[in-house]
C-alpha cells in the first residue's frame, strides 16, 4: 500500500471538489442551455445561473427562448426564476424540478443577437395547415358587387355568346354529326344489300311447289328452302346489326343535345360569378362579419397549442427516437430494465408563472398561473401537462384559461378551455375591407366560453359569445345609395349571440359562424337587396335560355337531317329482307305440309294393297 | 515522443527495479482499465486501487494504452458477450434490475453491452495476464532481453532517426 497515493488521491479529490464547486453553475448552465437549444432548434440562453450544491436549488435572472421561426425574436423570455431539484433522480441523470417560481414572462420580445443555430429542421407542425385552411374558408366567401345591383346589367359584355359552354358544345357536336352522317352515308352507298336481297328474291320465287311429284322432288326442294331461309336470316341479321349501330351513333349525338341543359346551368353560374351576384347564404353573414377577427385570434391560440405539441413529444415520436436497430459500433447498446419509479429525463413538476404577452404594448395581456408536469417524456411521466392561468389586461377583463396537453399515448390529445364572464368589450376591430359591412363593433359587456380539442390532426372547436348592447361602426361615409341601404341593416342590437364551430382535419377545416344577427340580417336584407339579386339573375337566365334554345334547335335539325336519310335506307332494307324471310318460311311450311300429305296417302294405299292380299288367304 | 519515453521507461522497469509481481500486478490492473470504456465509476475505482496498491505504475499505464488499442478490435465481441449477459441469462435479470434501480450503480454504466462485456472479459483475463506477465518479466530478466534486441523490428526502431532524436533529447543536460 502506498501512503503517498492516499495523499495524492485526497488532494486530487479536494481539487476536483473545489473545481466542481466553483464551476458547477457554469457547467449546469451550459448543460441546460445546450439541451434546451437542441430541443428548441434555436438558441436558449440563461443569464446569471446559480446552483446550490447543498440545498439543490437553482436560480437565474433571465432565460431567453428564441423563436425558431424568427431567430431575432424570443418566443418568450423570463425574469428571475427559482427552482429546487430532486436528488435521487440525478443518479440516473434525470433532472426533476419539484417546484419553480418564474416571474416576468414576456412573449415575443426582440433579441439583441440572432438565436440561430445550425440544427436539422424540425418537422412542420399542424399550425400552418390550420392557418391555411381557415384562410381558405374566409377567402371562399362571396363578394357582393353592389354596382351590379344598381346598374342595368349589360348582358352583351357579360355573356360572350361564342365562349358559352353551350355554344362550344354545339360546335363540337356539329363536327361530330357531320363525321357520323358522312360515315353512314358512305356505308349506304357501298352496301350491297339491295343486290343480295334481289338475288335471294329470285331464288325464293324459283321454288315451284306445283310440280312436286316424286320423293326426290320434295326432298330437294325442302333442302333448298332450308338453305334459302338460312341465307335470308344471315342477311337479315347483318342489316339489323348495321341498323342498331347507326341508331347507337345517332343516340349518342342526341344525348349530347340533352346535355346542353347542364352546360346551360354552368353558363348561368359563370355569368352570376362574373356579375358578383353569387348565391348569398345566411351563414355567410356571420363569416363575413366575424371571420377575419376570429381567424386572427384562432390562429394565435393555435400557435401556442402547436408549440405545446412541438415541445411535448408523444409516445410514438419518442419510440422512434429510442428505437436502436443497429447499435453504433464500439458504443454498445444500453439495455433498459424495468423501473418501479421511472423518471423522465426532464420534469418540471409544478411552476408558478407570471408575465405578459407583450411588454411594450397597451394591448398586452397579463398572465398569472400555474403549470404542472412539463416533461420531455410524457409517456414516462404518464400524466398530461396542465396549464391554468388567468389572462387579463390591467384594470380590465380576466379570462380563465385551462389547457391540457396529453401526450402520454401515441396520439396527442390537447384541449383548451377559455372562459370569461361579464368582461368589458368596448371597441372590436372587425377587419372588414368591404364598405357595406361594419368595420368596428361597439359593445358593452359580454361572456365567452370556448373549447378546443385537438386529437392527432383532427380539430374540434366551439366558441360561444354573448355580447350586450351592440352597435356597429362603418368606415368612411358613403354616397352610394345601395351601400347606404345595406348599412342600414346593421342597426343596434340589445344582445348578440355568436356561435363559432370549427371542425375537421387540420388541412380541411370547416368553419361555421352563426349568430342571431344572421336571421335579423337575412330578414332585413331580403327586403332590400333580394329583389335586386333576383332581377339580375332573371335577366341572365332569360338571355342564356334564348341562346341555348336557338342552338339546341340548330343541333336537333342538323342531326335529324343526317339521321333521316341513313335510317330510311336501312329500314327499307330491313322491310325487304323481312318480307323475303316470311315468303321462304311460308314456302318451307308448304313443302313440309305436302310431304306429310304424301306420306299419309302412301300409307293408305299400302294398307289397301295389304288388305286385298290378305282377303284371298283368309276365308271367312 | 511521449510514447517512446513511455516504452523506454517500461523497458527500464522490465530490466530492474520493481519486482515481477509488482509489474505483473500493475500490468493486469492497467489491462482491466484499458479494456473497459474509460469514463465509468468502476474504471475510476480500479484506477484508485492502482494508485493505492504497491504495483508498478509504468506497467499499469503501458497496459492501459495497449489494452485500449486492443479493445477497439475486441469491442464487437464484448458487445455480444455483454448483450448475452444482460439479456440472455434469465437468472441474472433480477440482479440487473435491482442494480439498475439503485442510485449509484447506473453510474458504472453496467447496463451498456460493451461496458459489461469488456469488464467481465477483463476480469476473466485478469489472472492469466497477471501470471503470464510475471513469467515474462522473469524470463526477460534471465536473458530474453538479449534475444529481443536481436529482433529485426527492434533493430529497425532503435536504428531509426526518431529514436536517435529521442535519445539525444533524453540525454540533454537541461
Image (tube, rainbow, N blue to C red):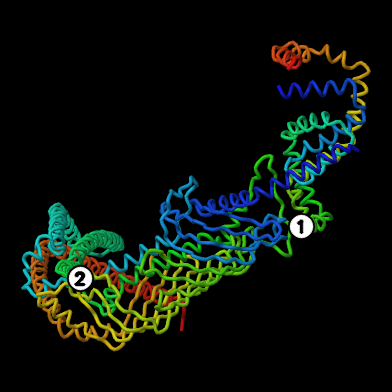
Residue matched to label 2:
A434
Residue B40 % position (x, y): 75, 45
Residue A274 % position (x, y): 15, 66
Residue A338 % position (x, y): 73, 60
The number of callouts visible is 2
* Front disc: 2 or 1: 1
- For label 2, the crowd category at 10 Å Cα-Cα, with few meaning under 14, some 14 to 19 and many 20 or more, is some
Please name the residue shown 37% across and 77% down the image.
Answer: A500
Dot 1 falls on a residue whose secondary structure is: loop
Which residue appears farthest toward the front when viewing the image?
A: B174
- For label 1, the crowd category at 10 Å Cα-Cα, with few meaning under 14, some 14 to 19 and many 20 or more, is some
- For the N terminus of chain A, the image quarter is top right
Q: Nearer the viewer, residue A231 or A65?
A: A65
B28 versus A100 height, above or below: above
> Is residue B17 visible from the viewing direction of this image?
yes
> Is residue A208 visible from the viewing direction of this image?
no
Please name the residue shown 31% across and 62% down the image.
Answer: A219
Dot 2 falls on a residue whose secondary structure is: loop
Give the left or right position of residue A467, taking residue A522 as reference: right
Residue B155 % position (x, y): 78, 12
Q: How far apart are the two marked residues, 2 and 1, measured between alpha carbons?
A: 68 Å
In the picture, residue A560 is in which quadrant?
A: bottom left
Q: Nearer the viewer, residue A351 or A232?
A: A351
Residue matched to label 1:
B103
Are discs 2 and 1 both within one chain?
Answer: no
**Label placed on residue A26:** none
Q: Are marks 2 and 1 in contact (CB under 8 Å)?
A: no
Label 2 is found on which chain of the structure?
A
Label 1 is found on which chain of the structure?
B
Give the left or right position of residue A454, taking residue A242 as reference: right
Amino acid at each position: 500500500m502506498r501512503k503517498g497515493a492516499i495523499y495524492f488521491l485526497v488532494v486530487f479529490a479536494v481539487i476536483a471538489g473545489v473545481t466542481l464547486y466553483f464551476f458547477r453553475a457554469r457547467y449546469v448552465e451550459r448543460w441546460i442551455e445546450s439541451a434546451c437549444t437542441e430541443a428548441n432548434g434555436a438558441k436558449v440562453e440563461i443569464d446569471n445561473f446559480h446552483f446550490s450544491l447543498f440545498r439543490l436549488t437553482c436560480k437565474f435572472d433571465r432565460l431567453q427562448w428564441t423563436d425558431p421561426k424568427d431567430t431575432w425574436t424570443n418566443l418568450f423570455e423570463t425574469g428571475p426564476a427559482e427552482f429546487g431539484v430532486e436528488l435521487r433522480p440525478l443518479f440516473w441523470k434525470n433532472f426533476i424540478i419539484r417546484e419553480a417560481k418564474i416571474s416576468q414572462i414576456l412573449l415575443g420580445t426582440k433579441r439583441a443577437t440572432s438565436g440561430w443555430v445550425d440544427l436539422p429542421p424540425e418537422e412542420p407542425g399542424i399550425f400552418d395547415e390550420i392557418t391555411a385552411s381557415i384562410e381558405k374558408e374566409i377567402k371562399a366567401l362571396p363578394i357582393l358587387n353592389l354596382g351590379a345591383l344598381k346598374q342595368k346589367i349589360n348582358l352583351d359584355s357579360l355573356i360572350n355568346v361564342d365562349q358559352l359552354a353551350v355554344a362550344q358544345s354545339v360546335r363540337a357536336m356539329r363536327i361530330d354529326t357531320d363525321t357520323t352522317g358522312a360515315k353512314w352515308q358512305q356505308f349506304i352507298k357501298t352496301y350491297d344489300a339491295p343486290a343480295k336481297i334481289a338475288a335471294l328474291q329470285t331464288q325464293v320465287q324459283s321454288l315451284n311447289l306445283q310440280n312436286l311429284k316424286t320423293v326426290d322432288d320434295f326432298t330437294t326442294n325442302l333442302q333448298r328452302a332450308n338453305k334459302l331461309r338460312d341465307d335470308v336470316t344471315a342477311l337479315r341479321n347483318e342489316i339489323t346489326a348495321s341498323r342498331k349501330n347507326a341508331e347507337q351513333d345517332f343516340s349518342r349525338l342526341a344525348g349530347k343535345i340533352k346535355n346542353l341543359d347542364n352546360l346551360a346551368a354552368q353558363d348561368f353560374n359563370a355569368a352570376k360569378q362574373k356579375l358578383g351576384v353569387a348565391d348569398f347564404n345566411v351563414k355567410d353573414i356571420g363569416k363575413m362579419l366575424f371571420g377575419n377577427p376570429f381567424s386572427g385570434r384562432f390562429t394565435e391560440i393555435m400557435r401556442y397549442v402547436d408549440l405545446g405539441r412541438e415541445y411535448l413529444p408523444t409516445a410514438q415520436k419518442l419510440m422512434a427516437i429510442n428505437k436502436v436497430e443497429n447499435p453504433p459500433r464500439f458504443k454498445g447498446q444500453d439495455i433498459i430494465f424495468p423501473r418501479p419509479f421511472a423518471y423522465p429525463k426532464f420534469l418540471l413538476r409544478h411552476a408558478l408563472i407570471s408575465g405578459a404577452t407583450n411588454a411594450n404594448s397597451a394591448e398586452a395581456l397579463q398572465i398569472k398561473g400555474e403549470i404542472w408536469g412539463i416533461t420531455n417524456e410524457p409517456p414516462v411521466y404518464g400524466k398530461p401537462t396542465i396549464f391554468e392561468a388567468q389572462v387579463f389586461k390591467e384594470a380590465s377583463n380576466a379570462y380563465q384559461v385551462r389547457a391540457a396537453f396529453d401526450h402520454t399515448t401515441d396520439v396527442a390529445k390537447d384541449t383548451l378551455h377559455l372562459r370569461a364572464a361579464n368582461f368589458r368589450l368596448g371597441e372590436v376591430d372587425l377587419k372588414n375591407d368591404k364598405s357595406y359591412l361594419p368595420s368596428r363593433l361597439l359593445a358593452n359587456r359580454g361572456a365567452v366560453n370556448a373549447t378546443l380539442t385537438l386529437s392527432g390532426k383532427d380539430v374540434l372547436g366551439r366558441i360561444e359569445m354573448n355580447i350586450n348592447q351592440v352597435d356597429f361602426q362603418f368606415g368612411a361615409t358613403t354616397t352610394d345609395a345601395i351601400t347606404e341601404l345595406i348599412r342600414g341593416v346593421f342597426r343596434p342590437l340589445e344582445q348578440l349571440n355568436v356561435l363559432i364551430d370549427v371542425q375537421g382535419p387540420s388541412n380541411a377545416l370547416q368553419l361555421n359562424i352563426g349568430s342571431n344577427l344572421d336571421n335579423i340580417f337575412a330578414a332585413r336584407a331580403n327586403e332590400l337587396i333580394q329583389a335586386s339579386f333576383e332581377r339580375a339573375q332573371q335577366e341572365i337566365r332569360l338571355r342564356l335560355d334564348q341562346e341555348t334554345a336557338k342552338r339546341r334547335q340548330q343541333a336537333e335539325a342538323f342531326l335529324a337531317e343526317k339521321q333521316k336519310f341513313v335510317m330510311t335506307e336501312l329500314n327499307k332494307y330491313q322491310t325487304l329482307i323481312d318480307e323475303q324471310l316470311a315468303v321462304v318460311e311460308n314456302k318451307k311450311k308448304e313443302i313440309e305440309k305436302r310431304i306429310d300429305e304424301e306420306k299419309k296417302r302412301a300409307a293408305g294405299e299400302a294398307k289397301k294393297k295389304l288388305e286385298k292380299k290378305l282377303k284371298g288367304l283368309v276365308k271367312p | 515522443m511521449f510514447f517512446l519515453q513511455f516504452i523506454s521507461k517500461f523497458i527500464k522497469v522490465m530490466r530492474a527495479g520493481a519486482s515481477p509481481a509488482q509489474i505483473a500486478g500493475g500490468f493486469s490492473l492497467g489491462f482491466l482499465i484499458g479494456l473497459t470504456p474509460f469514463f465509468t465509476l468502476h474504471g475510476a475505482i480500479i484506477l484508485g486501487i492502482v494508485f493505492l496498491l504497491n504495483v508498478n505504475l509504468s506497467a499499469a499505464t503501458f497496459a492501459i494504452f495497449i489494452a485500449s488499442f486492443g479493445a477497439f478490435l475486441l469491442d464487437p465481441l464484448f458487445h455480444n458477450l455483454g448483450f448475452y449477459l444482460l439479456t440472455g441469462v434469465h437468472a441474472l435479470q433480477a440482479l440487473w434490475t435491482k442494480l439498475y434501480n439503485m442510485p449509484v450503480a447506473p453510474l458504472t454504466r453496467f447496463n451498456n453491452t460493451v461496458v459489461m462485456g469488456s469488464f467481465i472479459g477483463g476480469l476473466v483475463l485478469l489472472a492469466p495476464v497477471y501470471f503470464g506477465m510475471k513469467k515474462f518479466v522473469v524470463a526477460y530478466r534471465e536473458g530474453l532481453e538479449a534475444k529481443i534486441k536481436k529482433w529485426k523490428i527492434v533493430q529497425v526502431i532503435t536504428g531509426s532517426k526518431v529514436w536517435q532524436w529521442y535519445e539525444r533529447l533524453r540525454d540533454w543536460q537541461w
